[in-house]
Amino acid sequence: MALSQAAPAVRLGARRGRGNLAGYLYLAPAGALLLAFHVYPLFYGAYVSLFRWGLTKQAFVGLSNYWGVLHDADFWRSLLVTVYYVIGVVPVEIVLGFLIASLLAQKIRGRAAYRLVYFLPYITSMVAMGLVWSWIFNANFGLLNSLLRLLHLPPQRWLLEPRTILALLHPGGAASATAGPSLALVCVAIVTIWYYTGFHVVVFLAGLTAIPTEVHEAARLDGAEGWRRMRWITLPLVSPTTFFLAVIATIGAFQSFAIVYTLTGGGVSGGAEAGGPLGTTRVATLFIFTVFYNEFRVGYATAAAFVVFAILLGLTGLQMRIGERRVHYLGG
Amino acid sequence: MSVRKRARMGRRELLRHGLGAAGGMALGGWLAPRGSRGAAAAEGPVPVTFWHANSGPLGTILSNLAKQFNASHPKYQIQPEFVGNYTALNQKIMSSVAAGAQPDAAQAGAYGAVAEYLKAGVIVPLQKYIDGTDGLSRSSLADIFPGFLEDNTYRVEHKATLVSWPFNKSVMVFYYNGTMLKSLGLDVPKTWDDVVAASEKATKAGKVAAGMGWTPGTEFFAALLYQNGGRLLSMDYTQALFHSEAGVRALTFLRDLNDKKIMYLTKQFDWQNDLVAQKICFAVSTIVSQQYIQQDLKGAWDLGVAPLPTGKNKATILFGSNGVIFARARPEAQVGAWTFFKWWAEPEQTALWSVQSHYLPLRKSALGTTLMRDLFAKDPRQRVALESLDYAHPMPDNVAGWVRIDPLLQDAITKAVTGLQAPKDALKEAATKANAILRG
Amino acid sequence: MRISRTAVHILLLCGAVATTFPFLWMLSSSLKSNIEAIRFPPTLVPQEWLWQNYVRAVAAAPFPRYFLNSLIQSTGVSACVTLTSALAAYAFAFLEFPGRRIIFGAFVTTLLVPPEITLIPNFVVITALHWYNTFLALIIPLGASVLSIFLLRQVFLAIPRDLHDAARVDGCSSGYFLWRIVVPLSGPGLAVVGLLAFLRAWNDLLWPLVATSTETMRTVQVGLLAFSQNVSTEYTLLMAATVMAILPTVAAFLLAQRQIIDGIGTTGLRG
């Protein structure tokens, strides 16, 4: 075998011993970087959050930053906006992804081409495509308003509209800002869905095609057809994938920054303050970023980040617990 | 593929990656910008980095002026760098200060920015240089328009101290479509009632979609507030006063303008596009906008500039930004920056800057220069801004914390004008939050 | 659900059109004149194709510099990630050492730490190291990726264990085995990891935004955002800039799309 011919001089020695050291050595580069930039920040961040910290480190204030955050109406509003956003984005991505993948799973021609097309948004930059979408949503000259005009419908302010869709449809009614997501937030959600659905399609497709055809055959022989087959066979078998995507998508939506910032914070349709019309698109990450980067209240912003982190951990834990009970694995 | 070929491929790949990483880092190190402290200039001019927010043509004018300074002052070399708009500039200044990588001097455009920098102790009050060997005499200081100096004066250790230096100043004026007004037989509006009447006539005649277009901001509201006899903050900057009767009246007036379709809301510079496209015939903005509107017009119609229409009183708003010098800059660089600022405000330079950029000149004596006299002869509209200086109020940008209050106020204004909240409630809510911020 | 074949195609086609339409609009807008771009009714195919919009866009902001910066950053990150992930994945896949399970678990838990948490402390750290506004700040913090380790570990695990044992019996050191055997056999996997890391770094906004301050250090994303703030009414120039910004990633993607998509797909299979 080429291997023994190519091997250098035979090395004897405590193989197991060397194996130990070698293992740690190989892990060292990745481990060091992860430790320095992913683990250490947790502890250093906790330290920072206990101080009044602006351009320079000031006084130690203990938990007062956390107290401030938990009593900050703007913070809770940003969490509410985040919740609207996550609820609006994740289920739609998953359902759309599943439906499209189901269509693609049937052996149709050009499947690879479709897969490519659907996946395309995901690899482009959010900034670039965000700017394209802001142009489409432009309140004066954008494509959508032009289309509305062609249909003799009134133009909308899209990314600048702080009112909810309900309020727009019933102008007379008393609609408060917290009564739901603003049209601007809906627009941001649409762009997010457009961007990420391809990812769900690809993952679902892999999951669906991994289901052995024998299973489908057996089900068909048993008389399970169409909708019943979907509900009792396909869905349960693809549930690990669904679960995986649900967790990933939720975490991703909670941490979404670039799309929201480009559409309603730093770009063509936004103003100086990030957070869109009346703060109705200020998701939690944007809140943290604004407090950090515009106001430079570093300690306060870090405390807010930890609160969001805790909430996200709890949410993910909850999802894991639900998933454990409802996910079926093929082969037990 | 044979195992050997694969092995070669694998090694080449890894090698390429390895080289890529090493090369990347080496290149990165080489390309990394050197802070002014890094460049040890024993001989040769002292580099002075200056960050600013003047984009496009304004940036070019600034660069040219800097080159002029460098030529006449070979000891120093001003290096202007465009960083972004006022918000981006403020963000970058703050983060680079935190990183210890700040420039030597900068333009500070965000409201309250100078106050924040002063509070954090990262800038050098310019009073030190004014009182120094290469300073300014009393008479020279008196020649500078008083409003500009007031804007830059803070109480430092109980003494009125000049902390920053006026850099680019402008006032809010009123733009109108001269051709259209003439065709409708209308005079230039002098009061807001005139504006309302003219707008209605123009809209009824089908010439425009509405009289005015406005991108919501705090400045226009502030102008109206002052015209109604109110003020934004108390004299000692500890209390918000914009929710007074005067404020409610001002905001209600804005809301009514919007409701009666005398005015509609735009975003960013769309009011400019609409004015040019004759969808509106009036607009309120800084005098600096004149050149941009004129450029877009391409002579399609006559652009008129008038003082801001009056309400109960005459009042308008002073815009612009100031220059600061950072404490951690090398002493030679600080002196260089001060020399530049001083030179900037001298009659010839300030006249040149004003004539080219349409910002206001900083000194009264600049008005006597040939440059400025020629400008007024050619374009009498430029006088309007100067004449408005007498009753121009600055925004409270020497109040630390205004940078957080401004967005609050803007939200309140937007909500009230679009009918989402009553003006009184919106202002009260904003005032409560503002007071909390002012209390620190 | 038995839908007819044509119905399936129609649905998929509609979806495909909806997905690609923004790209078409972007291209179309980038070639229009400003007047045509804001004209009503809107046109899809521009009346004249103004290629000079691209020239003007490049002149209006230092895009070549932004591209160079992004290239340096993304290549650096890609190389770093591939290297560190290959080494780590090798250790997890082939080597025995105490605490291997725990350490692997620890690595995976770092995935939970969100960017909001790491952003500010990392900023403070790189300023203390004087890496602010340099390529070191842009590359090093992004140099390790647990997802890449995960992916490569799966790829390495596919290599038969016997090969490894035989090599050890022959006296082959781990390094030699990794370099001469594992790496060549995992070419595609390494390429996917490298490419994905490149794409992720190229498209990143938040970190380069915070880690750089001067125009000469901006990456494409940060530069594009700044450009959009400064030419807010020149929509066609902006669209031209966005086309240029995504061209490299689209090209890279099209070249390796099968591997990338397959790679992404399999991450979901492990559940």
Image (tube, rainbow, N blue to C red):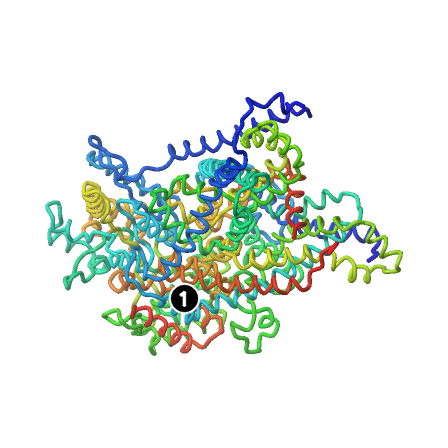
- Number of numbered discs: 1
- Look at label 1 and name its amino acid: Gln
* Position of residue B241 measured from the top left corner of the image (x, y, whole percent): 31, 74
> Which class describes the residues within 10 Å of circle 1: few (<14), some (14-19), or many (20+)?
some
* Position of residue A117 measured from the top left corner of the image (x, y, whole percent): 68, 45
Residue on which disc 1 sits:
B410
Position of the N terminus of chain C by quadrant: bottom right
* A318 displayed left or right of A264: right
Viewer-closest of A97 and A134: A97
At 74% across and 56% down in the image, what residue appears?
Answer: A237
Q: What secondary structure is marked by label 1?
A: helix
At 38% across and 69% down in the image, what residue appears?
Answer: A68
* B234 displayed left or right of C173: left
* B414 displayed left or right of B114: right
At 44% across and 36% down in the image, what residue appears?
Answer: C65
Residue B299 at least partly seen: no
* B99 displayed left or right of B133: right
Residue A144 at least partly seen: yes
* Position of residue C75 measured from the top left corner of the image (x, y, whole percent): 50, 36
Viewer-closest of A226 and C164: C164
